[in-house]
Image: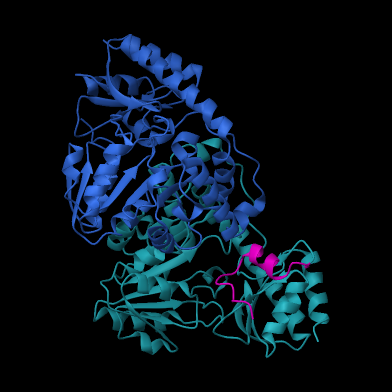
Chain colours: A cyan, B blue
Amino acid sequence: MESALPHGGDLGAARRLFPGAPEPFIDLSTGINPHSYPLPRLSSDVFARLPEPAALGRLAAAAANAYGAPSAGHVVPAPGTQILLPLVAGSVPPGRAAVLGPTYAEFSRVAALAGHEVAEVAEIHQLKDTDLAVVVNPNNPDGRFFKKDQLRDLANALERRSGLLVVDEAFMDVGPAGASLAGEVERRNIVVLRSFGKFFGLAGLRLGFALTAPALAARLAASLGPWAVSGPAIAIGEVALGDVRWAETMRKRLDGDARRLDSALTDRGIEIVGGTSLFRLVRVPAADALFRHLGHAGILVRRFAEQPTWLRIGLPGSEAAWDRLRASLASFA
Amino acid sequence: MESALPHGGDLGAARRLFPGAPEPFIDLSTGINPHSYPLPRLSSDVFARLPEPAALGRLAAAAANAYGAPSAGHVVPAPGTQILLPLVAGSVPPGRAAVLGPTYAEFSRVAALAGHEVAEVAEIHQLKDTDLAVVVNPNNPDGRFFKKDQLRDLANALERRSGLLVVDEAFMDVGPAGASLAGEVERRNIVVLRSFGKFFGLAGLRLGFALTAPALAARLAASLGPWAVSGPAIAIGEVALGDVRWAETMRKRLDGDARRLDSALTDRGIEIVGGTSLFRLVRVPAADALFRHLGHAGILVRRFAEQPTWLRIGLPGSEAAWDRLRASLASFA
């Protein structure tokens, strides 16, 4: 087996793995919404000038409002949540970190870089006796979900030892209503991470947010410096985060797309074991064979080195892509 | 006196300081080229998809070629150089840091955040007995310039105590030919920082580079994570950095603009004490009065809290802006 790609979205690597595959290659290897938010017209100043503090403030206010954080002072805009991970991990003195897994591998990597002793644990109660606890909610790739009460209890337990709870809500835009912990970040030991690019289908823009109490928010912002977020990201982010109607319509559309994906998979006897409305996780004994079968048909899905029977499958973005996925699944022995 | 703005480019703050000023407000408070590189057409994928490793690799190769670094493996692309400063400062164990000043204030701030004891020193030989030495070359705001030999000697002296030399070449695009230290970064204790947005007039895009030996380059890249640079920045950066003809023509144009600015200033008896082709530094006994006079005329220049007789003045970007600057200077008593 070729080495598993460490992340989704690398069509260049997919083309090297499957050189004869038909084009256009269809990327179902990420959880990024294929129906991108329509790009507004951007003034050339957005590219030319340094982003101004007032514009960043408006973006933070739009994010606080959209995500339900107490105020703009609880919001740290960043060029994607990825770049926040080492800063958040480094905001706690090196100690014991635990990541509820299996999940996105970057948490363990950056926690170790920040000097923590890192464990991946399987149950939420195992996070209690740590200095840094990471929960992805809903989880990627299995969609495992925790209610607010469970996370509040965890934050209480961590507080006794000045431990920090990091809740990555990268896929909460399509999670249960009212489930976000964003409203609780007045507490000093919670950081909620929100990704802009996944739900809005603009991952290349690089925009994400840490929501946390103002003291830590100010420290994170100081580490990022004054112009971490690009002019285009600020301009587009402010508009998109304020577009409540688009978000409501899109949530319904994605729910429908996800159910359609379920049908396409279960029609072929493929077991769905989890996911969110932006991706499904399937368990297939011959996962590697299915990965290759789809790959040769020009469809990239996500494998997991540690979980050889899993595949994560994102949403097709066009009828042509749906047709090719259905046809390829139908011809899988 | 109102508190000095900590950075240039904040027209929102300028409008609050000078509420009756004519519009459009002219921003001469930065060293950003007003003649921006023409934006190429961007595919929607550039915004929608996660940037691919191959695209980042092409950008790194274009930067290595444009700046004269030994290879793409010596290049760390980042969303602006600002965000690299804490990573570079943190790549050395906390110790003694020295910044050759007066210069851009962010170096001292981030070195202190990284745990260093920071001194601003006036002469290059005072940097030798440190763990982290920072030189901006040519310097902002005074244009002070060091030859390669001087910096090589400094790197040698630092090497004896495993000290790191950081050379910020933010304005080297308009510096003397052949003066960049980019070709020397095979040495283990040199980091050269290059800013994309200033010379190319695309500061809102957020793109910059660290050039350094591959081992440190890999560590810096690991801290930034896989998608630190936005899709638009990668796409535009690769095209612009490969456009040698534009760069050559622009250097000449900026040199001409800078001489024109000199005339406009010296015609009014204003003393020029330094700068680069992207800005001039002037010394004016009544600097605050001139700042206000220009501000009321809708022209923002840069003051310095620590140097009350200095003003930094960038290049007007249009004939209308030149006319307004000349007229405002002419009416200054």
What residue is shown at x 67% (from left), y 49% (from top)? B43
Q: Position of residue B254 (x, y in %)?
A: 46, 24
**Camera-side residue: A152 or A11?**
A11
In this view of the protein, can residue B65 be seen by the observer? Answer: yes
Percent coordinates x, y for residue B301 in the rendering:
34, 27
> What residue appears at the point 61 percent right and 42 percent down from the top-left corner?
A41
Can residue B317 be seen at all in this image of the molecule? no
Task: Determine the image quadrant of residue A292.
Answer: bottom right
Q: Is residue A89 above or below residue B155?
A: below
Asked whether A262 or A249 is in front, the reply is A262
Q: Which of the two residues, A307 or B75, is positioned nearer the viewer here? A: B75
Residue B245 shown left or right of residue B295 in the figure = right
Residue B248 drawn at (x, y percent): 53, 28
Q: Is residue B270 above or below residue A71?
A: above
Quadrant position of residue B175: top left
Q: Quadrant of the N terminus of chain B?
A: top left
Left or right: residue A145 compared with residue A26:
left
Q: How many numbered marks are there?
A: 0
Residue A14 magenta-drawn? yes
Q: Is residue B274 magenta?
A: no
Q: Which residues are magenta?
A: A1-21
Q: Main secondary structure of the magenta part?
A: loop
Q: In percent of the image, x 78 and y 86: which residue is there? A: A268
